[in-house]
Amino acid sequence: MAFYLQSLGIVNALGNDCESVLRNMLAGQVPLQQCDWVANKVTFIAPVSAPLLPVPPPLYPWRSRNLQLALTAIEQIRPAIQAACDAYGADRIAVVTGTSTSGIGEGEAAIAAAEEHGQRPADYHYRQQEIGNLGPLIARHLQLNGPAYTLSTACSSSAHALGSARRLLMSGLADAVVVGGADSLCRLTVNGFAALESTSTTPAAPFSRNRNGISIGEGAAFFLLTRELLGDQPEAIELLAVGASSDAHHISAPDPQGLGAQAAIAMALKDAGVAAKDVGYINLHGTGTPLNDAMEADVVSRCFPHQPWCSSSKGQIGHTLGAAGASEAALSWLVLSNLNSAGHLPPHSWDGVWDERLPRLKLVEAPARLPENARKIILSNSFAFGGNNAVVILAGAQ
Amino acid sequence: MKALTLILLLALSGCAQHSYQSYRLNPDCPGSAVEEVALLNVSDGNTNTQLVLHVQQADKRAIDSTGEIDTDIIVALNPVGVPLFSAQLQQGDISVNTAPGYRGPDAASIIWAYQLWRQRDQAAVCWPSAQHLQVQQTPGDLTLRSGKRILAQWQAQSPAVILLPQEKLRISVRKLD
C-alpha cells in the first residue's frame, strides 16, 4: 500500500508558500534574528515575517498565532482537500496535527495585561492556548468529519503525527488525512530553553565546534496524505515509513549512545523496505546543542556508513519545536518535488567549523544534488525531549 | 405550590425520558457469530465522535460456569486506540461500562443503535413489543417507536446511517476488514 504526501502547505521564517521556502532554502538564506526576550542573555529566533491569514469569525474564540500559522499553511492545500472531499466525503477525511507551545503566546499577553491593568482581558480564554484544540479546529474550519486530534510529544510531535496519519490510512479509519504541525514563538519557550542553558548566543550552528544551543523558530507545514493520487497535478511523493522509539534514559537529554535514535532509524528503514545505503540525503535533527549533535553524529555515522548527504535546517528556520517534524519533512518533500527537478539539496547553515570530536558527516556545504542513478530517498530525524524519537522516510516518484 | 410544580415538572421530565439501557433484546434474537470491527461516526450536529467498535463473542466458560450462555462483548476505542466504553450483551440484557474520562454521546444509546443496525433485518424479532416498543419495517425503512416517539430510524437510501431522533444523534457505520 502506498501513502502519498501529494500536496504541501508551508510557512516558516523562509517564506509562506512552497516556492518561496524552496527558493530561500536553496539560496542558503539565514533569517534568524537577535532576540532580547531572555534577561541578560542574547538569543536568536526565526520568526515568520510574512503575513499570516486572519482567524475567521467562526474560529475567533480560539484565535492564536499558532492557529494563524496553521491556517496559512492549510489554505495552500485547500484545492487538494476539496478533491479528497469530493472523492471520499467529509466523514472519511481525518486531521492529525502536532504542536507543543500552541497558543501559549496568547496566555502570556493576557498575563502581561493582567499585571498592567489588574485583570486579564475580557476576551481572553484558556481555550486559545489549549494544545488539543489544533486538530479539531482545523477539521471544523475545513468542515471535515473524520477523526481529528492533536499529538504533543515536544519536538517530535508532528513527525509522530505523520506516523499516526499513516496508521489511520492503513487501518481503514480514514481515506485521506490532513496532517502536519504548527508551533508559534513565545517568551515562555525561549526562556524555558534558556533556563536549560540550551539557547544559542549566536545563530544556531549545528555540529560546529562552537555550537552552544538552539535558535527557536516558528512555522507550520501541512500535507494531504492519501492512498491514491487525486486532483490536479498531485506530487507522487511517498511517505514510506515513520519509525518511533523512546530512549527511556533522561527527562530532557538524549541517550548519549543514541540507542533509541538508532532503533527509530532501524524501524523506519525496515518499515520502508529500504536499505540504509539507499538513503541519499538525511535531514538531521541537528539542533545545535552539544548533546544532541554528538549523539546524532554518532548514530548517523554508525547507521549510514556510505556517508549520504546531510544537513540540518535549524540554522535556517530555527527549531520549530512541535512543528519541526512536519516542517523538516516538508523541506525534504520540496527537495523531491517537481519544483526542484534538479534535485538540489538544502545547504547546512553554520559557521563552517566542524567539531572534530564527532564522527564526520558529509554536510551539504557546496551545492549538491541527490544521486540520480537510484530512487530518491530522504530520511528526516526528530529527536525530542525525554528521548522520544521519530524518523520519517520519504521517496520521490518511482 | 412552587415546590409542587417543580416536583411535577421533574416527574414529567423523568417520564419523558427513556433509557436504552432499560430495554431488553429478545433472547431469541439471532446473534452475530462473527467477530466484527466497525468505525462509527457519531454526530450530534455540532461535534463528531469517531469510535472503533470491536465485537467478539466471549469465551462462554469465562462468563458462565455452565458454558452455555452466548455473550457478545463490544469494546469502543477512539481512533488512536484508547478504550472509551465496553458493553456485554447476554440473553437480551446489555450492560455498559464507560471509562471515567469519556465525555462523548451516551454509550448505551450508541450500543443499542449499533445493535439495531446490525440486526436490522431481524428487527421485528429482536425488539419485542412487550417493552412498549413498536417496530415498523418495510424493505426500505425501519422505525423503532415508543408510543408516538421515534427512537431510531434506518432507511435503505442511506444504508450506513441510523438516526436517534430523541438524542439528536446521527450514527454512520462502516465495517472494517
Image (cartoon, coloured by chain):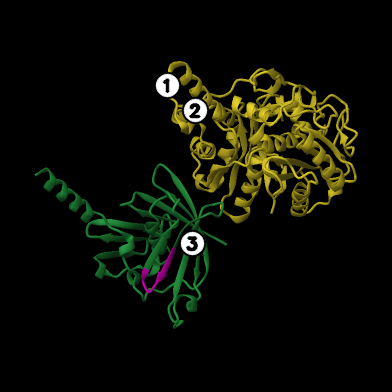
Chain colours: A yellow, B green
In the rendered view, tell whether residue A1 sits above or below residue A7: below
Residue linked to disc 1: A119
| Residue nearest the observer in this picture, A113 or A325 | A113
Label 1 is found on which chain of the structure? A
The reply, left or right, for residue A69 in relation to residue A351 is left
| Residue nearest the observer in this picture, B135 or A154 | A154
In the rendered view, tell whether residue A331 sits above or below residue A260: above
User: Residue drawn at (60%, 20%), measured in percent from left and top?
Assistant: A51
Residue linked to disc 3: B75
User: CA–CA distance between discs 1 and 2?
Assistant: 20 Å
- Disc 2 on helix, strand or loop? loop
User: Residue drawn at (77%, 48%), measured in percent from left and top?
Assistant: A265
Mark number displayed over residue B67: none
Residue A235 belongs to magenta span:
no
Label 3 is found on which chain of the structure? B
Residue B90 belongs to magenta span:
yes
Query: Where residue A31 appears, x then y in whole percent?
Result: 73, 21
Which quadrant holds residue A237?
top right
